[in-house]
Amino acid sequence: MNTTLNNLLRGTAVAAALLTSLASQAADGQDAHQRYLDGEPQAASISSGTQLVPGSYARYLAHYGMPLSQALAKAEATGEYATLVTATPAAPTQLSSYQVYQRNFGIAPTL
C-alpha cells in the first residue's frame, strides 16, 4: 500500500512538472504568433556566416546514420564535394497598419 502511494505521488509530481513545461512552451508559441499578427519584425532565422552544405549523397548517408564527417569524406571519394555557402540574413521589415490588417484577415500583405 505504501509503495502504491509513493508511486502515485511520484507520478503526480512528474505530471505536474510536464504540464507546467508544456504550458510555458504554449505561451511562447502564442506570443510568437501574436507578434507575427502584429507585424513586429522577427529576429533573423539565419545567422550570418559561412557553412558547408553537404551534397545529396552525403545527406543520404547522414540520414541513414553515418556521422556527417564520414559521410562528407565518403561523398568526396565519389567526386561529390560539399558547397561553401555564405548566409546573410534579410533585414527585418516593419509592417504598416494596413498590412497588419491584411495579415489578420488572411490577405497576403504587400511588402
Image (cartoon, rainbow, N blue to C red):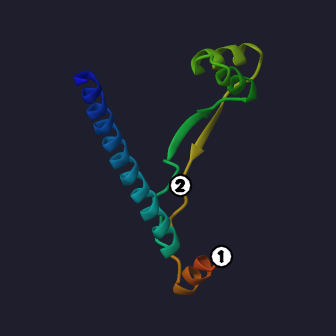
Residue 22 image label: none
Q: Which residue is mark 2?
A: 89
- How far across and how far down the image is residue 67, in percent? 58, 17
Residue type at the position of mark 2: Pro
- How far across and how far down the image is residue 12, in percent? 31, 38
Q: Which residue is mark 1?
A: 106
- Crowd band around label 2 with a 10 angstrom C-alpha radius: few (<14), some (14–19), many (20+): few
Question: Which residue is at a point 29% across and 26% down the rendered structure image?
Answer: 4
Please tell me how many numbered marks the rendered image carries.
2
Question: Which residue is at a point 77% across and 15% down the rendered structure image?
Answer: 78
Q: Specify whether 35 is left or right of 24.
A: right
Question: Which residue is at a point 56% across and 36% down the rendered structure image?
Answer: 51
Dividing the image into 4 quarters, which one contains the C terminus?
A: bottom right
Residue 24 or residue 82, whichever sits in front: 24
- Crowd band around label 1 with a 10 angstrom C-alpha radius: few (<14), some (14–19), many (20+): few
Q: CA distance from mark 1 to mark 2?
A: 26 Å
- Callout 2: SS: loop
Closer to the chain start, of discs 1 and 2, is 2
Name the outermost residue toward the front. Answer: 1
Residue type at the position of mark 1: Gly
